[in-house]
Amino acid sequence: MRAYDIVLALHIIAALAVFGMSTLLHGCEWMARRARTVAELRPLGTAMGYGFLMPVLGTTLVALGVVLVLISPDDEKVGFGDPFVWCGLVAYVLLSASGAVMAPYSKAIATAVAAAPDGPIGPELRRVVLARPGMLVGHMTTALLLAVVVDMTTKPDALVAPLVLAAGLVVGYLAGEAAARPVAETAAVATATR
């Protein structure tokens, strides 16, 4: 077994960890839309407080990817000039910048839910939990990561690779918009459009 194979396995494990954490966080966000009481929100808010792990997992994923490029064997040689590699690095820069929004968002949710008294969810708590910037950036981040996986597996040319990232951002934006609406608001919009 080559060192490359070991690093590749670790890279895939890191990707699975990133998507596992993403699934947990988005699952909690979508369940929070339906929550009616603070008691229903408490376990979700606690889980969403673990969002601080995403930068650690993401950095591990990218570091292992860089090592893969550096030690790629001659028969599978890739370089930083390959579109799928530089697009992945551009995506990492965008993902790192998203931490400026996501870290305070995760902390604000965990703090607000922990401090809320039992009973129905008030408008201020619902506003914190369903904060539009956090929902948008979180969903765009996950969709961007999925777009990077598409680029990594299909290895498109320099024209298509960035378009895949752009498509991921659009899909993430649309999902984030949907997630930022409480269920009651979504039902009211559906009724109004009939």
Image (cartoon, rainbow, N blue to C red):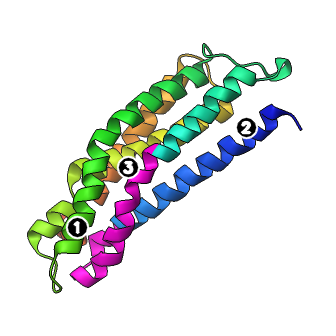
Please say whether residue 135 is one of the residues in the magenta stretch: no
Q: Which mark is residue 154?
A: none
**Where does the image place residue 5, in percent across and percent down from the top left?**
80, 37
182 and 61: which one is in front?
61
Nearest to viewer (mark 3 / mark 2): 2
- Whether residue 124 can be seen here: yes
Main SS, magenta region, reads helix
x then y, percent, for residue 58: 50, 42
Circle on res. 139? 3
Q: Which residues are magenta?
A: 30-55
Please tell me which residue lies in front, 191 or 30.
30
**Residue at image location 48% in from the left, 45% down from the top:** 56
Q: Amino acid at mark 2?
A: Val
Instruction: Work out whether 101 lies above or below 190.
Output: above
Q: CA distance from mark 3 to mark 2?
A: 28 Å
Which amino acid is tagged 1? Answer: Pro
Q: Which residue is mark 1?
A: 182
Of circles 3 and 1, which is in front?
3
Q: Which residue, given by chain and number where applicable, does mark 2 sit on?
A: 7
Q: Name the residue at the top extreme.
A: 81
Q: Quadrant of the N terminus?
A: top right
First in residue order: circle 3 vs circle 1: 3
| Mark 3 or mark 2, earlier in chain | 2
Image quadrant containing the C terminus: bottom left
Position of 165 with respect to 172 (left or right) is right
- Which residue is at the far right? 1
> At 16% from the left edge and 76% from the top edge, which residue is drawn?
116
Q: Quadrant of residue 154?
A: top right
Gap between marks 1 and 2 measured at Cα? 42 Å
Tell me which residue sits at (33%, 39%) in the image.
98
Residue kind at label 3, given as amino acid type: His
